[in-house]
Image (cartoon, rainbow, N blue to C red):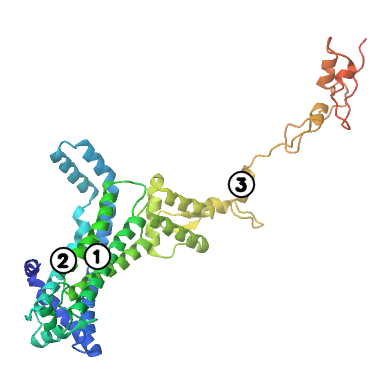
Amino acid sequence: MDTIASLFSFITTPVSWVIVQFHTVYGALFGADSGWAWGLSIVSLVILIRICLIPLFVKQIKATRAMQTLQPEMKKIQERYKNDRQRQSEEMMKLYKESGTNPLSSCLPILAQSPFFFALYHVLNGIASGKQIGVIDEGLLESARNAHIFGAPLAAKFFSSEAQVTALNASLTDVRVVTAIMIVLMSASQFYTQRQLMTKNVDTTVKTPFMQQQKMLMYVFPVMFAVFGVNFPVGVLVYWLTTNVWTMGQQMYVIHNNPTPGSKAQAAYLERLTKHVTQHGKVRRRSEKVIVKAIVAKGRDRNEYERKFINALNKAGLAAEADGTVVKSAVQAATQTEDGAAPGTVAAAAGRRQQPKRQSKAQRQSGGPKAAGDSLSLEKSDDPQDAKPAAAKQAEKPGSGTRSKAQSGQRKGGPQRPKSPSKK
């Protein structure tokens, strides 16, 4: 670790200068030799670095989503050229070039942060060994060596010997308890950050090897932090714990406001957006307009959650425009009536077919009037010959039985069939 840290010694002076400037501010509040002054200086260094890395973080999000989108195509290439590694690599590079995706973009924040991490490690290691590094002179070096956080010196490690800890005016028990707690918190925050990404912000409609890799990293990273954490000074543990908490909060914000399409986070986001838009009839924020614009542009390629969002707007008499705004639907407005009928009710009523009224058997046999709404209703005939029922005709046929048998099917209390004139 010392050899790696020495490779980034060129950035040691800027890092030490930033820490000293923050220490000057916090030293005036908590005391120059206070552990809070030095500890908050390290925390402020993390915040400053992470603010500078926000553009890279945005690039990382875009690159990660682009890689998730390309996973099905990548799988097809791997299966098609599984026996030709060179052709497989060429097709992969061609796919990256056509889609404008760079796999290394997802690692940019970590790579950019690494020099500051190792430079800080180099500074704290120099403080532990009593060496002046960067702009930290002899007075600042003595102040940093006397600074303790919850009884543990900034430069102490979990496996520091008792003699080294005693030289820093601390006890070995305090150092190991504080470092153990910080390592557990560091690993737990890393695990929660990765788990939050896997359970909420991953497209569940596509099963790819990328998801399996992320699942594996969810368990591997915390173990790595635990293994390497025992060799980190307390000041570096403060730095790494702070950057993990920042990453966790930053990711929570992104998942809440700009989720991955097809993920559970997107379903929750669109549900909240639907309630807001249907209540106010418009989209307020620019980020919301960007998401609505992307959903409209997808057309038939929308996922299940996006289709539900568009359908909910249509039911509320609203329509999403190509520029991301939401307006009153022209189709729905055209169906409104002057008496204030709700949108869509008139069109629905007009389009509904009028069903004829069901007739009783006696009405059908007696040739009664048709139900209201039937355009083919027939008028009653005054001629008794026209009103002769079919049953009476059948009774006149030879071999059909007596007249009383033909009339036995009449209902009690119902209209009687007209008697046919006897034939001689």
* Residue ID at (41%, 51%): 296
Which residue in the protein does label 2 denote? 114
Q: Which mark is residue 55?
A: 1
Q: Which mark is residue 249?
A: none
Q: Nearer the viewer, mark 3 or mark 1?
A: 1
- Helix or strand or loop: what does disc 1 sit on? helix
Q: Dots 3 and 1: beta carbons under 8 Å? A: no
Check disc 3 and give the amino acid type.
Answer: Ala
Q: Distance between the residues labelled 2 and 3?
A: 64 Å
Closer-to-camera residue (147/249): 147
Density class for disc 1 (Cα within 10 Å; few <14, some 14-19, many ≥20) is: few
Closer-to-camera residue (182/123): 182
Quarter-of-image position of residue 257: bottom left
Which residue in the protein does label 3 denote? 348
Q: Residue 358 at x, y = what percent?
A: 74, 35
- First in residue order: circle 2 vs circle 1: 1
